[in-house]
Amino acid sequence: MNIRITIVSLMFVTLSAMAAGDESANVAKHLVVGDPPPHVTGAFRPFAIPGEIDVADGFIELRQGRSMTVWCPESVEREKPDKVTAARRFIDSPFLPVGSVSVAYFGDEGGAQALESLGVRFTKHDARRLPPSAQTQLVVVGLGAEHGPQTPEQKRSFQEWLSSRTVVVLPGADLSLLPFGLSPGRAPLRAEEASVPDLPVFAGIQRDFEEFLRLCAGRETDVVEGGPAWLLSARPACFAHLKTGSMSAIVLTVAPGDVPEPARAALSRIWCTILANLNVETLFRAPEGVSLP
């Protein structure tokens, strides 16, 4: 394997790797000092190295296939050079970005279109014929999934199958498929209430959540209600996280297509960041005239 590394402040750091006779082994790692490009969608998420760089340092990463770009704030370069050194060590390391997880979707075309609009690659399934584990690293449940099982036994089987997986629940999905006693509710959106649970799955969404609430202030929307005492949700409860045993469920109650155009980009970025935190790839899409270097 031949490796060449070039580091230039305010520019990309590129690492080229080629396994003989196998072009699919190409991998690129980049370091940029500056802000990430304006974007509507894309697998952006906080970049962290335990004990060296944490979410509060403001590093952002974007993974696309086997490539990875890390952005470092200019203030960190000026004030915390040790953080930049740690990031460069990571870039120089033999670490190769792993591929994204497989996504299995159960539900109607509305949910499928919402995933497609974010650039999510997924396979669609019916709850009567459950797919193999290799295709279900992440399960997404949308409106209509409850119509797949034709008998009470099939529904119980589907629920038991979900109970050992990581599940993302889209707006409108039947919450009775989850073993948590959740119910849908309605609440007005208020920007001053914005708060996000301190959880890895929600890391990096606070700013976009505040913008979304500001743009939709006063609008009433679906929220999560009920559930166990250990339910962790945003305020207002537009999304929530529940974990029990080997099941982890992330519930989203409002979709980008359901809000006015000005707020759509902020909510799309929230969804993309949550999915990226789950290692789902979402394609980069920027406002007109903006592109990645």
Image (cartoon, rainbow, N blue to C red):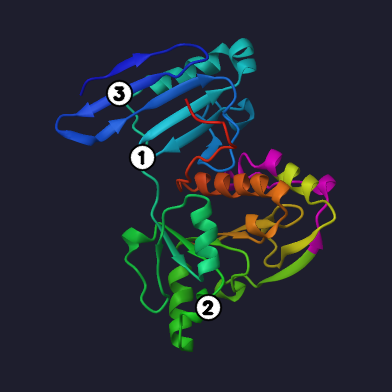
The boundaries of the magenta stretch are: 187-208
Q: Earlier along the polypeptide chain: callout 3 or callout 2? A: 3
Marks 1/3 in contact by CB < 8 Å: the verdict is: no
Residue 20 appears left or right of 15: left
Is 21 within the magenta? no
Q: Label 2 crowding class (10 Å Cα cut-off): few <14, some 14-19, many 20+?
A: many
* Camera-nearest label, 1 or 3: 3
Q: For the point 65% across and 45% down, which residue is it? A: 265
* Tag 2: amino acid: Glu
Q: What residue does disc 2 label?
A: 146
Rendered position, 107 above or below 200? below
Rendered position, 223 above or below 62? below
Rendered position, 127 above or below 57? below
x then y, percent, for residue 67: 38, 33
x then y, percent, for residue 105: 45, 64
Q: What residue does disc 3 label?
A: 16
- Residue found at the very far left of the displayed protein: 21
Image disc number at residue 98: 1
* Tag 3: amino acid: Ser
* Tag 1: amino acid: Val
Residue 153 visible in the displayed image = yes
Q: For the point 67% across and 66% down, which residue is it? A: 228
Q: What distance separates the C-alpha of mark 1 from that of mark 3? A: 16 Å
